[in-house]
Image (cartoon, grey):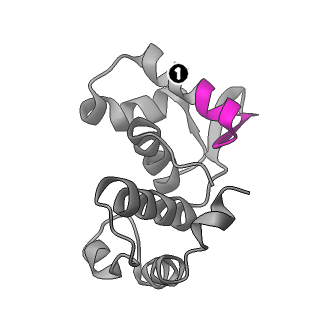
């Protein structure tokens, strides 16, 4: 699974909270956090569309976006990548680091714990 860039993750989080959304609606939700222009949001959405992270279709005459990447799977991949690559941790990350998150509910937290505890071997990831 591709690990999104931090800016792509910001857009995905906006989409996961409410979808489908137009590029303008997504931009309004991330503008303060990212501090960039509407054209930057559009360009990032185009790259995410090319990477297969989001899908695009017309709804009521407006182009809208929906997440293709599943939230829990993506968060698990992001956390695993951070733990392994940034923190150099070979053991599974504790799910307690996500406690209190506004992004995941209790059911998603349990799914996240399962994914992090049973992550495939690195050899399997390169296939």
Which of the two residues, 39 or 94, is positioned nearer the viewer here? 94
Q: Give the answer, above or below, for where 77 lies relative to 25.
A: below
Q: Is residue 29 magenta?
A: no
The C terminus, quarter of image: bottom right
Report x, y in % for residue 39. Answer: 46, 14
Report x, y in % for residue 111. Answer: 52, 81
Q: Residue at x 67, y 28 (%)?
A: 63
Specify whether 36 is left or right of 11.
Answer: left
Which of the two residues, 95 or 100, is positioned nearer the viewer here? 95
> Number of numbered discs present?
1
Residue assigned mark 1: 42
Specify whether 9 is left or right of 51.
Answer: left
Specify whether 55 is left or right of 84.
Answer: right
Specify whether 45 is left or right of 52.
Answer: left
The local crowd at label 1, few if under 14, some if 14 to 19, many if 20 or more residues have their Cα within 10 Å, is some
Q: Residue furthest front?
A: 123
Which quadrant holds residue 59?
top right
Identify the magenta region: 46-59
Which quadrant holds residue 102?
bottom left
Report x, y in % for residue 93. Answer: 36, 75
Which of the two residues, 60 or 49, is positioned nearer the viewer here? 49
Q: Give the answer, above or below, for where 53 lies relative to 81.
A: above
Q: Residue at x 40, y 70 (%)?
A: 104
Q: Residue at x 68, y 66 (%)?
A: 124
Which of the two residues, 54 or 123, is positioned nearer the viewer here? 123
Report x, y in % for residue 114. Answer: 52, 84
Q: Residue at x 26, y 25 (%)?
A: 35
The N terminus, quarter of image: bottom right
């Amino acid at each position: 699974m591709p690990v999104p860039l931090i800016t792509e993750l910001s857009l995905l989080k906006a989409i996961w909270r409410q979808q489908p959304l137009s590029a303008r609606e997504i931009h309004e939700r991330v503008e303060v956090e990212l501090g960039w222009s509407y054209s930057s949001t559009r360009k990032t959405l185009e790259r995410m569309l090319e990477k297969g992270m989001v899908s695009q279709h017309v709804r009521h005459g407006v182009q809208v976006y929906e997440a293709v990447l599943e939230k829990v799977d993506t968060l698990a991949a992001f956390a695993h990548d951070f733990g392994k690559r940034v923190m150099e941790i070979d053991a599974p990350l504790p799910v307690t680091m996500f406690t209190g998150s506004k992004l995941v509910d209790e059911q998603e937290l349990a799914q996240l714990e399962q994914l992090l505890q049973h992550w495939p071997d690195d050899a399997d990831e390169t296939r």
